[in-house]
Every structure is written in structure tokens, then in C-alpha cells.
Amino acid sequence: MVEFIGNGTTEEEVFEEIKIRNELAPISTFDEYLSILDEIIEEKVTFGEMNQDEDTQMVKDKLAHRFDELLSDVVTDSGDATNTTGLE
């Protein structure tokens, strides 16, 4: 199910943007991930892609849980996925 978060923007589109930014400048910590997520949501609000009165915290919470998914695309030299959240 595709869930729209404002003016046609989907959570998946926000996550795809995070993945693109990760390719440009690798995100290595959960705090960096949350910072990038905040940045993207602020940009979406600024450019009218999300409504300012939307529950942006709910969107952030949902996407915060996808950090491990982002890391699963990043493999260390030993071939193991890196988990820096401390969550298993």
C-alpha cells in the first residue's frame, strides 16, 4: 500500500531521496540518518511538497525505522552489513 504524506509525496519517495543522499555522502550513524530525514522533510514543507500542518513527527517516526534497511545496502569489506543502531 502506498501511503501519501502530503501533496502527492509518499514515504517511499522520501526514503528514496535518503538513499540518493547516502550514495553522495554515506550515512554511517543513526543520528546522521535522522538529521538527513529532518532536512528532507523541511525541504518538502518549504517547497510545498508537504503541508506544514501535517503530522511530520509521525512520518519521521515511520521512516526512522528504515535505517537498518538503508544499511543493508551498505556492505563492509568483510561482507557483513553494518549495524550502528545497537538495535537487533
Image (cartoon, rainbow, N blue to C red):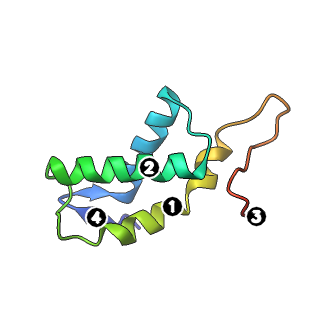
Kind of element beneath mark 1: helix
Say whether disc 4 or disc 2 marks the residue closer to the N-terminus: 4
Residue at 17% of width from left, 59% of height from top? 7
Residue 6 seen anywhere in this rendered image of the structure: yes
Residue 15 seen anywhere in this rendered image of the structure: no
Which amino acid, by three-letter code, is at mark 1? Ala
Q: Which residue is mark 2?
A: 35
Which amino acid, by three-letter code, is at mark 3? Glu
| Label 4, label 2: how far apart the Cα atoms are | 19 Å
Q: Could you classify mark 4 by the number of other residues whose Cα lies within 10 Å: few (under 14), some (14-19), or many (20 or more)? A: many
| Label 2, label 3: how far apart the Cα atoms are | 22 Å
Which amino acid, by three-letter code, is at mark 2? Ser
Task: Find residue 5 and name its label.
Answer: 4
Q: Which residue is mark 3?
A: 88
Judged by depth in the image, the label closer to the viewer, 2 or 3, is 2
Which quadrant does the C terminus fall into? bottom right
Point out residue 60 in the picture as x, y percentages from the top left corner: 41, 63
Say whether disc 1 or disc 4 marks the residue closer to the N-terminus: 4
Q: Which residue is mark 1?
A: 64
